[in-house]
Image: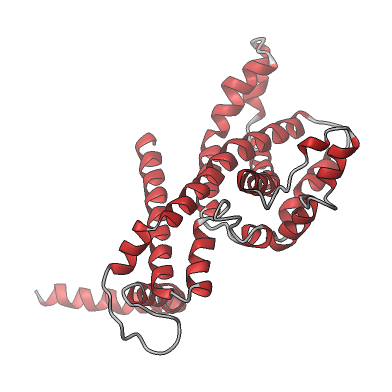
Amino acid sequence: MQSTAKKFWIDIKQSIPAYLLILPTIAVFVIFLYTPFINAIRISMYKYNGIGELTDYVGLDNYLIVLKDPKFYEAFFNTFKLIGADAILSISIGFFLAYVLYRGIPLKRFFSTSLFIPYLISMVVIGSIWRIIYDPTIGPINQLLQLIGLGEWAQPWLSQYETSLPAIILTWIWHTIPFNMLIIYANVMTMPSDFIEAAEMDGATSWQKLRYIIVPYLLPTLLVLLLLTVTTDLRAFDMVWVMTQGGPGGASEVITSYVYRKAFSSQNFGVATAASIIMMLIMLSITLTSQFLNRKKA
């Protein structure tokens, strides 16, 4: 018994340097992640306008207010429309561009660099640029339509209920394509050349090499990009707020702009915090489900 206790204390002493090394990281997590999260849960259970002490306890009423609000569901479905379009179009176009670069084209380095530029521009700048592009009077889209005789197709793209969300989705996809292209291109370049050489020796066509070698090899990468697309698009805010502020009439409202509006326009921080926690639980469930499915396949 004494030898076991002695061994235990020896192990503890030997582990002290390791614990000291990870202590700063633990402290950062506690201060900047866990403490704000616990405080957010606390705020979500109070009627709170952001000023003074938390005194008006309402329990889970803020969560019920969010879940009964039609505007929340409109923002929720708009967010998943953005995710769906981004996942399908952005990853597909990024894959196509990566494959074109992989096959080789003239001025390959120039095109790979220039295609990545949209991703380097901040969301606020992109939103401001595309707001001008969509402008019904000075915007180049409507001017081009007028020029080619399709003036009846000209629209107030961002101030019309039917077109505001598609216009934002198009802009968002334009921004995310370069990232997907770069990740796919970087991974396809790591593929062993033996695979392609063996297929060529067997007389495989370009389509067969793409379908049976390249796509299966990139499948784990595509799944990771899909997960990143979902988690990133759930946090979409800057571009939406700059371009439309969720309007007109909530047509382009997303979950993050809904939270922002509740907090800073309605001064209802309790409801806003409850909505943000619901959004976090959605993100967490998607991430855990994805990890579970990946482990099951492995």
Residue 93 location (% of width, % of height): 67, 35
Q: Nearer the viewer, residue 174 or 75?
A: 75
Residue drawn at (29%, 68%) of the image = 61
Kindly tell me whether residue 263 is visible in this rendering.
Answer: yes
Relative to 259, 169 lies left or right: right
Q: Nearer the viewer, residue 222 or 258?
A: 258
Relative to 182, 267 lies left or right: left
Quadrant in the picture for residue 64: bottom left
Q: Is residue 186 above or below residue 255?
A: above
Relative to 126, 47 lies left or right: left
Residue drawn at (62%, 16%) of the image = 208
Residue 141 location (% of width, % of height): 81, 44
Residue sitting at the far left: 1
Kindly tell me whether residue 189 is visible in this rendering.
Answer: no
Residue drawn at (40%, 46%) of the image = 291
The quadrant in which the C terminus is found is: top left
Residue 292 location (% of width, % of height): 35, 43
Residue 135 location (% of width, % of height): 78, 53
Q: Nearer the viewer, residue 184 or 237?
A: 237
Residue sitting at the far right: 147
Quadrant in the picture for residue 98: top right
Residue drawn at (67%, 28%) of the image = 193
Q: Is residue 227 above or below residue 218?
A: below
Q: Nearer the viewer, residue 285 or 199?
A: 285
